[in-house]
Amino acid sequence: METLLTAARQQTNENDLAALLDKILTAPKQHAMLVNTLSRMEYVGARKMVKARHTDSMDVAGLQHLLEEVGHALRLKRAAIKLNGGVEENVATYSAVDTLAGAAGEAYLQGVDRGCEELINHLELAEPQRSEVNYVLSSLAIEVRAEAFYPVYEEALQRAGIAFSVRSILSDELRHLEEMTAAIARHLPADGSTLMQAALQVEGQCFRTWIAALRESVS
Ligand SMILES: [Fe+2]
Ligand SMILES: [Fe+2]
């Protein structure tokens, strides 16, 4: 897992993400819209979870995970409003006018989900196991990225002297990552680590596409 995290951190730092964030953070409205995009991504992640998880396999850890992702969406939404001077205008919804590369952010999650679905196709799993394995694999890849992305963003916030922190979100994501890693070993004892590597490759491509769209949308 450490190797996977190191690789994701390296890739996150590629293309000078820190410099891009520094630039975004100099313009409060733009920054607020980026935080609203992150909120949208947490929300879409939670929505995917609701759709993927069958009642037959839903447990306390699953409900906790869902609650925390919705909580991240809410915390980021409130932060976006605060960064926007306390007004909802420009960050009220998740529409294109209220987000920075918001559609591309959502496409990132769809891409990871679809990519992981293709990766497990050959296992010919029956429902509900198919949805469960896809949930675990795509969540794992996204949690690895969260563990790489949020610290870079946190440092940018500190450099800019902005009184907002994503540390508590980060500690939730780290716990989710540990849970997903354990779940992979449970669901896929034989090909878990190969699939994990492949899922991270797919995710890496989706992440690069999102960052490219973000760069494009920055004025
Ligand atoms: Fe989250
Ligand atoms: Fe998470």
Image (tube, rainbow, N blue to C red):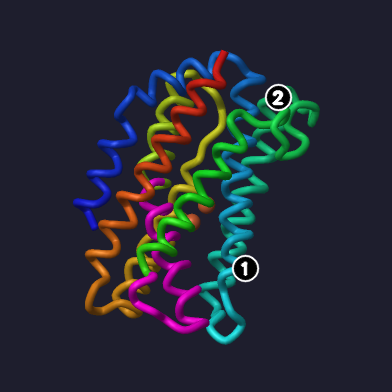
Disc 1 marks a residue whose amino acid type is Lys
Foreground: 168 or 156? 156
> Residue 165: percent from the left, percent from the top?
52, 36
Mark 2: C-beta under 8 Å from nearest atom of ligand 1: no
> Image point 22% across, 53% down: which residue?
2
Packing grade of label 2 (10 A; few <14, some 14-19, many >=20) is some
The residue that appears at 61% across and 28% down in the rendered structure is 100
Q: Is residue 42 magenta?
A: no
Give the percent coordinates (x, y) of residue 22: 45, 18
Based on the displayed image, in which of its 4 quarters is residue 117 positioned? bottom left
172 lies left or right of 12: right
What residue is shown at x 34% (from left), y 22% (from top)?
16
Say which quarter of the image contains residue 91.
top right
116 in relation to 219, above or below = below
Q: Nearer the viewer, residue 171 or 14?
A: 14
**Highlighted range, magenta:** 121-145
* Residue 97, numbered label: none
Front label number (1 vs 2) = 1
Residue 177 to residue 12: above or below: below
Where residue 143 sits, quadrant-wise, is bottom left
The residue identified by callout 2 is 84
**Label 1: how many Cα within 10 Å (few below 14, some 14–19, many 20+):** few
